[in-house]
């Protein structure tokens, strides 16, 4: 039984490993319907960073970036959360200005207009003033900007563990149950 409908948009910035780990964790969760849309650069960066992308590995429905007939292109489909991971500054800029030129930006626009959860996993450094202003604009519109900035409280010793400090935070922001390190946890 589906209890949550989530859109995962994979943008074209570096950081495919974040999307991969997020998909791995979403795949293991019960009651989640996850629909995925990827930018053209997302496929290229995935190939460069992780190898060839195979959608058959994932129990998700994939939509073309120009498929405006995708259910989450409309607020009436009632998806409760959209995660853009990774999210380039260019993509944040297009979302901030309301440009809905593809399915990713249209779906983000829908989430904002419907006052639903939009989590943007920003992947850039350093930030220019334009980046900061765009992040302020999307935040004021209701989005959550969650930079892909790992934490080290849990003393991660592998790349996956470092990546999980970001991915687990994203899952927390999406109000999904995740077994993760908690600050000052006595266990």
Image: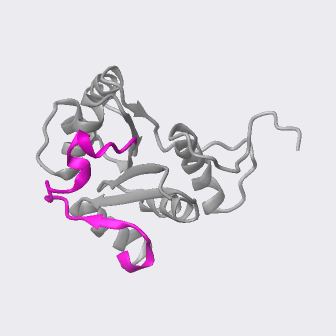
Residue 156 position by quadrant: bottom right
Q: Position of residue 61 (x, y in %)?
A: 33, 66
Q: Residue at x 60, y 53 (%)?
A: 164
The single residue placed furthest to the top in the displayed view is: 140
Is residue 82 a member of the stretch shown in magenta? Answer: no
Residue 68 is left or right of residue 133, and the answer is left
Colour pattern: one colour
Q: Is residue 26 above or below residue 57?
A: above
Left or right side of 178 for 185:
right
Is residue 54 visible in the rendered image? The answer is no
Residue that sits furthest to the front in the current view: 1
Is residue 109 visible in the rendered image? The answer is yes
- Measuring 75% from the left and 35% from the top, which residue is drawn there? 183
Q: Quadrant of the C terminus?
A: top right
What percent of the width, then of the height, locates residue 56?
38, 79
Instruction: Tell me residue 10's x, y (percent).
Output: 34, 56
The span picked out in magenta is: 55-80
């Amino acid at each position: 039984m589906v209890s949550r409908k989530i859109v995962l948009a994979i943008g074209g910035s570096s950081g495919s490993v974040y999307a991969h780990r997020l998909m791995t964790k979403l795949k293991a969760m019960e009651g989640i319907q996850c629909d995925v849309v990827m930018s053209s650069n997302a496929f290229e960066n995935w190939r460069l960073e992780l190898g060839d992308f195979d959608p058959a590995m994932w129990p998700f429905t994939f939509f073309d970036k120009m498929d405006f007939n995708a259910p989450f292109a409309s607020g009436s489909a009632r998806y409760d959360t959209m995660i853009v991971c990774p999210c380039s500054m260019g993509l944040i800029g297009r979302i901030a200005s309301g440009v809905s030129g593809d399915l990713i930006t249209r779906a983000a626009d829908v989430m904002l207009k419907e006052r639903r959860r939009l989590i943007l996993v920003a992947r850039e450094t350093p930030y220019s003033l334009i980046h900061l202003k765009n992040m302020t604009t999307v935040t004021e519109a209701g989005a959550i900007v969650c930079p892909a900035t790992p934490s080290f409280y849990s003393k991660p010793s592998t790349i996956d563990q470092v990546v999980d400090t970001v991915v687990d935070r994203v899952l927390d922001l999406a109000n999904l149950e995740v077994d993760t390190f908690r600050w000052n946890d006595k266990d």
